[in-house]
Image (tube, rainbow, N blue to C red):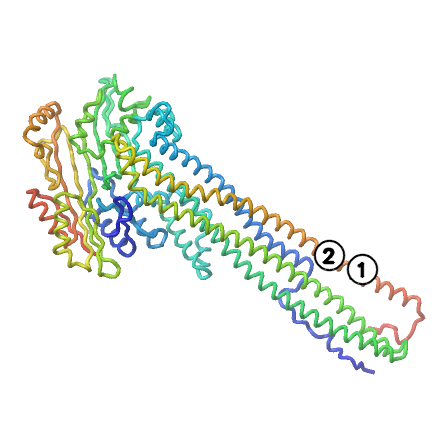
């Protein structure tokens, strides 16, 4: 276990490459819908990180030791590299000239490789640390209503990667000076700073809490709140020597974490050769068009099922004021060794979840 | 009568290496090398300008972070914490008119983190540029060294040949004394002495040219070496500072996120300050770097340019001296020809001295 700073785990080659490869492939295997952060930019960020490590541009890969995903520093690196790529390429000159001098000094071989890395990086769409936008769904000047969708992609402070989508409608007499502003032609929209900040701050709330929080805003009628969460990711990667295994250092303290811990000290303890990875992908929706309130998420039951008896009456009264229902789900991608962990977790929670296989190397 | 002196010396080819030398070719070669140096100095000048802009940007960011830190510490809050914090936000581009409640601190800190990471990266990127320049200059030194050795060898060749010619000249002059004045033998010896003189003029010029070329290349090498060392030191300094800054930023990223979220919940302000202190420390290191390199540039680059200017003057004076000497030799040769022509015109015609019919 290599925790180098608060919730920060450092992986080096070759473990880091194995981890990035498994994580990248798990995103593909998970068949992510539009509810989740976009897969392609995230995969391209992971590929860029792997390449920068291979070229020695960076020495370590920093991973959030709770969520098992690359942390803020790692997410930022490819973005920073991309932002300086154009200027650096102009200074480096022609790649063929650098390659021709490769035999002259180690520097030129390294610069030629870096040149290729920057060239490739220029065309890549990378995963953002934060990205929020407002899309206009409908605008009816006659009735004075406008419907919007707010999308926020965020590397959450808990270490997971989240996409939050909120669909809402505003009444015209209010929306011009309130939550969302339309431009003069009525075609594009932008959230007010206060509303934008509120959405950002509340992104780690579950869909139910967020629906209630936003529905309370003046002039706003929320129709859907949907969260797609990538993570946590649990991994066990043998080190280059094959004797030790690097594992997610601070697994969550929940049913998944407990099953993982049991595996780590049980069947997983003897595994020193094969890398293993288990990734969780959760969706959490609160919407007016959901028919049945239900959670198929083995680690996140409905709020009503978690409340004590004395709180139930107050909760029911609160819910009666809002017309939505909640649906939660979670799917997993697991290597052969960790499939048992996912199965045990779902069996113990009584949920039926998709568990996709992730083949090793 | 045949000469006892070894006249083969006159027909011997002197083994100079390279493409031959003249005042003009030497001037062109030296100028070529000087251009390479000038280009590197220009690169350094551009870097100095860039350094100033990075320093300014760094200072601005440091100011923002220090303000954050100060206000969180409660040391600069005349109008209360939130009033102070609004002022802090006014330092962030685009946030001047916004109130505290209108922006997530977590988002703000993450954005600041990304800007800081970019600044450090920008500075670090110059290390490669400098290392590339350093390699170019060391390659240039290798090339100059080859030229120096070549010039030294050629000078030695020229000197040896001049000595041989001198010996031959003395022998021929001694022989001339022994033969009858105005005889065919004397005319023949004199013809050979003239050949020796012409050769002496040519190769003594070469002695001077190769000798001065060797010296000038040696001076050029010394300046190139100084330039390479300057660049290497600068690259090492930048690498040291940016590596330290980068590590500190990496280590602070999780704290920045965690504390940002905590600050958004209006809690744990002390923790936030601690996190910012870590970030400020990183900024301090980077600012220290730009400050130091600024001094480095001021104290080194200007001196270096001055030295190069001096060297430029030296080169010019050496070239002028060569030109002057060449001109003298040329004038002496012309004068000798005139003297001979005048003397021949004054003397009575002699069958032995008449030119052979072709």
Choose top left, top right, bottom left or bottom right for residue A317.
Answer: top left
Confirm whether residue B127 shows in the render: yes
Label 1 with label 2: CB-CB less than 8 Å: no
User: Given this view, does label 1 or label 2 mark the residue nearer the observer?
Assistant: 2
Q: Which residue is mark 2?
A: B321
- Which residue: 22% across, 58% down? A244
Secondary structure beneath disc 2? helix
Question: Label 2 marks which chain's residue?
Answer: B
Relative to B203, say whether A164 is above or below: above
Residues at marks 1 and 2, CA–CA distance in whole angstroms: 15 Å
Left or right, residue B180 beside residue A135? right
- The reply to the same-chain question for discs 1 and 2 is yes
Image spot of residue B17 (x, y percent): 63, 68
Choose top left, top right, bottom left or bottom right for residue A177.
Answer: top left
Image spot of residue B248 (x, y percent): 35, 45
Q: Which residue is mark 1?
A: B331
Q: Residue furthest front?
A: B75
Badge count: 2
- Which residue: 23% across, 31% down? A202
Relative to A77, say whether B192 is above or below: below
Q: Nearer the viewer, residue B240 or B334?
A: B240
Dot 1 or dot 2, earlier in sequence: 2
**Neighbours of disc 1 within 10 Å: few (<14), some (14-19), many (20+):** few
Image spot of residue B216 (x, y percent): 64, 58
- Which residue: 27% across, 54% down? A17
Quarter of the image with the N terminus of chain B in it: bottom right
- Which residue: 75% across, 57% down? B324
Question: Label 1 marks which chain's residue?
Answer: B
């Amino acid at each position: 276990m290599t925790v180098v700073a608060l919730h920060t785990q450092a992986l080096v080659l070759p473990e880091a490459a194995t981890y990035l490869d498994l994580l990248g492939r798990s995103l593909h295997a998970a068949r992510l819908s539009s509810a989740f952060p976009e897969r392609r930019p995230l995969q391209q960020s992971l590929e860029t990180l792997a390449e920068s490590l291979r070229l020695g541009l960076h020495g370590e890969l920093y991973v959030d030791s709770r969520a098992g995903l690359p942390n803020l520093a790692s997410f930022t690196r490819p973005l920073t590299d991309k932002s300086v790529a154009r200027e650096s390429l102009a200074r480096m000159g022609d790649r063929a000239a650098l390659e021709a001098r490769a035999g002259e000094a180690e520097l030129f071989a390294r610069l030629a490789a870096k040149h290729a890395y920057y060239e490739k990086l220029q065309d890549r769409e990378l995963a953002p640390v934060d990205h929020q936008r407002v899309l206009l769904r409908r605008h009816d000047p006659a009735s004075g209503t406008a419907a919007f969708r707010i999308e926020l992609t965020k590397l959450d402070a808990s270490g997971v990667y989240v996409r939050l989508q909120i669909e809402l409608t505003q009444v015209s007499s209010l929306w011009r000076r309130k939550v969302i502003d339309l431009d003069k032609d009525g075609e594009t929209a932008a959230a007010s700073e206060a509303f934008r900040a509120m959405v950002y701050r509340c992104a780690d709330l579950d869909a139910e809490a967020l629906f209630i929080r936003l529905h309370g805003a003046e002039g706003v009628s929320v129709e859907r709140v949907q969260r797609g969460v990538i993570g946590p990711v649990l991994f066990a990667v043998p080190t280059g020597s094959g004797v030790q295994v690097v594992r997610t250092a601070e697994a969550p303290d929940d049913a998944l974490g407990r099953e993982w811990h049991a595996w780590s000290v049980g069947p997983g303890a003897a595994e020193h050769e094969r890398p293993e990875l288990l990734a969780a992908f959760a969706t959490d929706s609160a919407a007016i068009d959901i028919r049945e309130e239900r959670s198929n998420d083995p680690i996140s039951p409905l709020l009503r099922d978690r409340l004590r008896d004395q709180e139930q009456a107050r909760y029911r009264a609160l819910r009666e004021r809002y017309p939505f229902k909640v649906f939660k789900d979670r799917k997993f991608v697991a290597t052969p060794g960790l499939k048992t962990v996912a199965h045990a977790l779902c069996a113990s929670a009584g949920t039926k979840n998709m568990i996709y296989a992730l083949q090793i190397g | 009568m045949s000469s006892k002196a070894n006249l083969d010396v006159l027909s011997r080819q002197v083994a100079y290496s390279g493409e031959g030398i003249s005042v003009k070719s030497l001037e062109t070669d030296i100028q070529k090398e000087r251009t390479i140096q000038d280009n590197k100095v220009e690169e350094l000048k551009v870097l100095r300008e860039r350094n100033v802009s990075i320093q300014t940007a760094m200072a601005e960011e440091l100011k923002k972070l220090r303000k954050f830190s100060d206000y969180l510490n409660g040391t600069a809050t005349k109008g209360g914490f939130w009033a102070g914090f609004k002022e802090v936000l006014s330092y962030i581009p685009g946030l001047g008119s916004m109130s505290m409640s209108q922006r997530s601190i977590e988002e703000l800190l993450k954005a600041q983190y990304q800007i800081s990471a970019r600044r450090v990266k920008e500075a670090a990127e110059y290390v490669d540029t400098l290392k590339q320049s350093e390699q170019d200059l060391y390659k240039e030194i290798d090339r100059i060294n080859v030229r120096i050795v070549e010039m030294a060898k050629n000078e030695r060749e020229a000197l040896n040949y001049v000595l041989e010619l001198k010996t031959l000249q003395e022998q021929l002059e001694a022989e001339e004394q022994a033969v009858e004045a105005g005889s065919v033998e004397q005319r023949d010896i004199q013809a050979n002495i003239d050949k020796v003189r012409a050769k002496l003029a040519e190769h003594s010029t070469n002695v001077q040219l190769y000798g001065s070329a060797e010296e000038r290349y040696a001076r050029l090498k010394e300046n190139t070496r100084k330039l390479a060392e300057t660049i290497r030191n600068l690259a090492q300094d930048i690498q040291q500072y940016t590596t330290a800054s980068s590590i500190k930023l990496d280590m602070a990223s999780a704290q920045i996120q965690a504390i940002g979220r905590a600050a958004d919940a209006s809690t744990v302000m002390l923790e936030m300050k601690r996190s910012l202190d870590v970030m400020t420390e990183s900024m301090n290191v980077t600012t220290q770097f730009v400050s130091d390199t600024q001094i480095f540039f001021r104290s080194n680059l200007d001196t270096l340019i001055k030295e190069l200017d001096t060297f430029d003057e030296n080169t010019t004076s050496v070239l002028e001296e060569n030109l002057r000497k060449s001109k003298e030799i040329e004038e002496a040769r012309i004068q000798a020809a005139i003297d001979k022509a005048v003397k021949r015109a004054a003397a009575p015609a002699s069958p032995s001295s008449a030119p052979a019919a072709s």
